[in-house]
Image: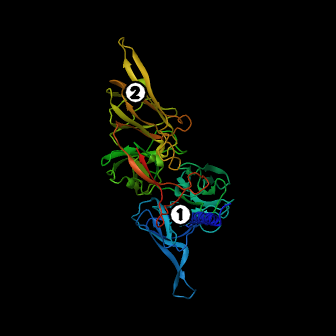
Amino acid sequence: MPSHNRMTRIADTLVLLALLVANRHASAQLPHARLSWIYPPGGSAGAEIDVTVGGEDLDDLTQLRFSHPDIGSQPKLEPLFPSSEKNRVVPNRFRITIPSSVPPGVYDVRAVGRYWVSTPRRFTVTGHTGMVEQGTHATAATAMPLPLNTPLYGHAEGNAVDWYRFHLGKNQWIVIDCMAERIDSAMDATLAVVDASGHTLRVERDSDLEDPIVHFVAPREGDYWVEVYDALYRGGNDYGYCVEARTAPSIDYVFPPAAQPGTPTTLTFFGRNLPGSQPTADDRTRNSAPEQLQQAVEVPALPSDATGAYEGRVVRPDALGIDEFPYTLDTPAGSSNRVWIGYASAPVVVEQEPNNQPDKAQRVTPPCEFAGRFYPARDRDWITLDAHKGESLWIEVISERTDLPTDPWLLIQRVETDKQGHRQVHDLKEVDDAAALAGGPAFGHASRDPALRFTAPADGTYRIVVRDLNGGSSAEPGNVYRLVLRPARPDFRLLAMLKSPFEDDPNKPRRWNPVLRQGGTTPLRIIAHR
């Protein structure tokens, strides 16, 4: 039998192991601030607004910290007693100051308090003075007035619909835009336009980054209503949204969608209410005939810090290699919505129709960026070029990664003539989707844009055909693309990403912050985005 001393040592060891496990468990359960929502989820440049935040472990908050350094915050104060000259801090409430110099866009916000810096949420800055929903407006009879060109912040209630009312003249055009998922809301927003007879005229759910946008022309003068609700009728503080009915100039898309850095370029803007515009010959887009306006644009230089190209916007992981700059069309009728124009890596060649047959392929000379449109339905665009044996080209389509509902596909062919003078065509490479990104599912997913390094097997002529696999069902003039043809060269960007402690559990939070306590470590994943 074991001796008493041995039994004592075993007992002491078990107690020590239990304490270590308990301490490890306690360390894992230490509080850490997590910001779940901010309301209202945005404000206008040049304004001061009061916001409320909510989440977990938000004790003794001292400030809100924004990704734009000029946006400031101060805790909200109130008298300690009704007649007291002393003030106390109102928990989880802040006064936000947004200077007029802050560009419209979407920024990150974090709460700072006793339990460190919280996880981020999105906060939108608009160029127009906004307002916050007031009172109960869950029926058409109690609908809240929605002034045109005024962002309105609200949040969905469970099993309810928010009603808003506005007046339009006959044939007056507006765009109704509801931002929800674009500003990090849990809401799957839906919009419905209703007339005075109670007839539903338009319903939209997913138009832009899974948020609804309605382009509407009033069939007659009068009052109209818009319903805003979650698709599953959920609600709560983290179901915030921003809805706006705009008559100001609205840009649908720009063509070509890219320009070389630092080069003045004339671009064509397609949209509505564009002063000085001309009607376009394109078919109806989004249920309203678009206009086109040619405009000289001073393309800025490419920022030396690539991260500056992403400030104020939501960027998909697979779009990190695409540099763009923001552009707003300023007119006497007001400023347009902000659009993003790509930085071209080579001279831009614009598609010239007809080029939808192999014998009508448009000739190009690399390096270049070929700018085209997947339009009309089932469109195929052909180009031809010459290459020398062993010459390498990086060939890449940029379309779906710019948040378009496209699925590009390309085929590379070699064209040669035999000794009898007969033309022979050989299919060399067919590419659909790009390879999956490094970083795994916690980082992102593979893009639908094809990309490859192609090496010419011989001197001669080559053809490339590009088409949209969705082009038979969702053809739109605004489904633009860039076909990049340039020499292959080593290039990469490094992305530092925290390893999620929850990536193996889909039911856990998708947002987290590094928690580096004294004497501790935290894993950091470095991804080379090539």
User: In this figure, which residue is indicated by the disc labeled 2?
Assistant: 463
Image quadrant of residue 140?
Answer: bottom right
**Number of other residues with Cα within 10 Å of mark 2, as a class: few under 14, some 14 to 19, many 20 or more:** many
User: In this figure, which residue is indicated by the disc labeled 1?
Assistant: 41
Q: Looking at numbered disc 2 in the image, what kind of residue is underneath it?
A: Arg
From the viewer's perspective, is residue 181 above or below residue 72? above
For the C terminus, the quadrant is: top left
Check contact, mark 2 vs mark 1: CB within 8 A.
Answer: no
Q: Looking at numbered disc 1 in the image, what kind of residue is underneath it?
A: Pro
Q: How many marks?
A: 2
For the N terminus, the quadrant is: bottom right
Question: Is residue 276 in view?
Answer: no
From the viewer's perspective, is residue 484 above or below residue 173? above
Is 524 displayed left or right of 197 in the figure? left
The residues bearing labels 2 and 1 have C-alpha atoms spaced at a distance of: 50 Å
Q: Judge by depth and name the residue closer to the eye, 206 or 215.
A: 206
From the viewer's perspective, is residue 307 above or below residue 383? below
Residue 526 placement (x, y as % from top left): 43, 51
Residue 270 placement (x, y as % from top left): 44, 46
Q: Residue at x 36, y 11 (%)?
A: 420
**Number of other residues with Cα within 10 Å of mark 1, as a class: few under 14, some 14 to 19, many 20 or more:** many
Considering the numbered disc 1 on the image, is that residue within a helix, a strand or a loop? loop
Q: Which mark is residue 206?
A: none
Question: Is residue 127 in view?
Answer: yes
Residue 165 placement (x, y as % from top left): 60, 60
